[in-house]
Amino acid sequence: MRIISIGCPVPSPNVDNHSIANAPSLFDYDACIIDPQAVSEQIEGLASMTLDAKSPDGRAISPGESGAFHFGLGELLQSRQLELRQLLDRGGLLVVFAYANVRHPSVASFAGLTRYSLIPSPEGDPFKWPSLRPADGKDVRSVIPQHAAAGFLDDLAGRLRYRAILDLDDSHDGTVLGRSVGGAAVAAEFRVGAGRIVVLPPPDTLAATQRKVFSSALLECVERLLQEPEVEEAPLWVRRYDTPASASARDELSAAELELKQAQRRVQEARSLLADATRLQGMLWQSQNAALRELIEDAFRLLGYAVTSSEAAIEIRDGSDSVLVEISSSNNAVSDRLYLTLQQRVEEQYLRRKTRPRGIIVANGLRNTDPRVRREPFPRALVNACETYGYALIPVEVLFELVTFADEASDEPELLEEIRRSIAETAGVLEIALEEEEDDDGDEADEADEAAAIDEGNEAAIGASESV
């Protein structure tokens, strides 16, 4: 058997490894392994002339049309498209690693070129959006143990990383071979003409020693796919000839599949509930990004503020009082220059509106460390500046505690008003008595009571001994 690999190095004397540019005719092989992402990178490199490659006849690849001394990129790719079609028409095998689709507008001579344009489309074109969607995960499980791809999926479960999922419906004539732990299809087989396309999740980042194991498993999978005949599903009328044993087994399978679907649905619902319930915890560790900003805005809304924001800044209102908010999150201590940014915004608003707003800095220094053990998450210079200018410096863990309390007291507006008043009256670091600290104080009080009781017991015992 003859095997060629495009964009995926498979070190083996049984495999010819080539790029999309220098490969010989693909239809002369029994199987072709192709990595669409690697091919995309090669196409972009050829289109921008940053990749030096030659066609099989030795001519340079040109982004334009073909000429006497160069081969046009568009013509090359169209030739590869036809070669893969011929390979499948003669019963060949095409193994494709699944990535999200992308366009290649830089190749003007191949209008509408996408990452999957070279690959003959199965029924229903599963490589188009939304049938093929971006995704990311490492939990991959085979669903047809007897299929040749099962060994590849199971043996390399920890070394694969799916980058896309296949959402197949009745319009797609395909068989799912592997699923993620959440039930998404990440591997499948399609019939195209007399041949087959097997879609697999690509490998994760592999070390040199792991690459050898991956290549060996992939080659074994391809060889088995070429040797074993395609498994055809029995026609529906065969069920009329079920024996009691086969009918019982079929019912057992149907019941198990139904339970699996129900369990997967419950898992998805539970994940959604957990994500919603823990969403605000993100402010304790998120980096400086749009997600953190949205969380901080939602936190102030829960505290009863009206929030308005632009791409550059956040402003909150408590009645007629305007408050400007600055946010900073860092792996290290936040910068002591935060107050300068806030001060500039305050002065600019004063010049525009003739009213001087208050200021708040929400600081998330040492964001990768548990807030309970963070040491100096913001410099003393920032604290001094906030005390001098009357800005409230709110550690992110304090804001989280306030929001947690506010969520529980959402029907008590007077308590929310008291929180906002405390923030308004703060110049410097906002401090609150955390529940854990109260519990610790309570534990210390209990320990003190126990110690006092022991002392009293000891004194009584000593008195009794003396009287004897």
Image (spheres, rainbow, N blue to C red):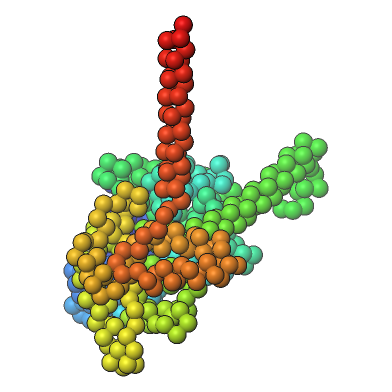
Q: Is residue 231 left or right of residue 363?
A: right
Image spot of residue 364 (x, y percent): 32, 61
Q: Residue at x 24, y 82 (%)?
A: 344
Q: Residue at x 46, y 42 (%)?
A: 442
Tally the numbered discs: 0
Q: Nearer the viewer, residue 272 or 133?
A: 272
Residue 387 in view, yes or no: yes
Horizontal placement of 386 versus 395: left or right?
left
Picture layout, residue 46 above or below residue 87: below
User: Image quarter for residue 334?
Assistant: bottom left
Q: Position of residue 298 (x, y in %)?
A: 47, 70
Q: Which of the two residues, 335 or 220, is positioned nearer the viewer here?
A: 335
Q: Say if 330 sits above or below 103 in the image.
A: above
- Residue 418 location in percent, x, y? 48, 68
Identify the residue shown where x is 43% and y is 29%. Answer: 452
Determine which quarter of the picture holds residue 64.
bottom left
Residue located 42% across and 10% down the image: 466
Q: Quadrant of residue 158?
A: top left
Judge left or right: residue 392 versus residue 455: left
- Who is closer to the viewer here, 145 or 279? 279
Residue 447: percent from left, percent from top = 43, 33
Q: Is residue 90 above or below residue 454?
A: below
Query: Furthest-top residue in view?
Result: 468
Residue 219 in sight in this render? no
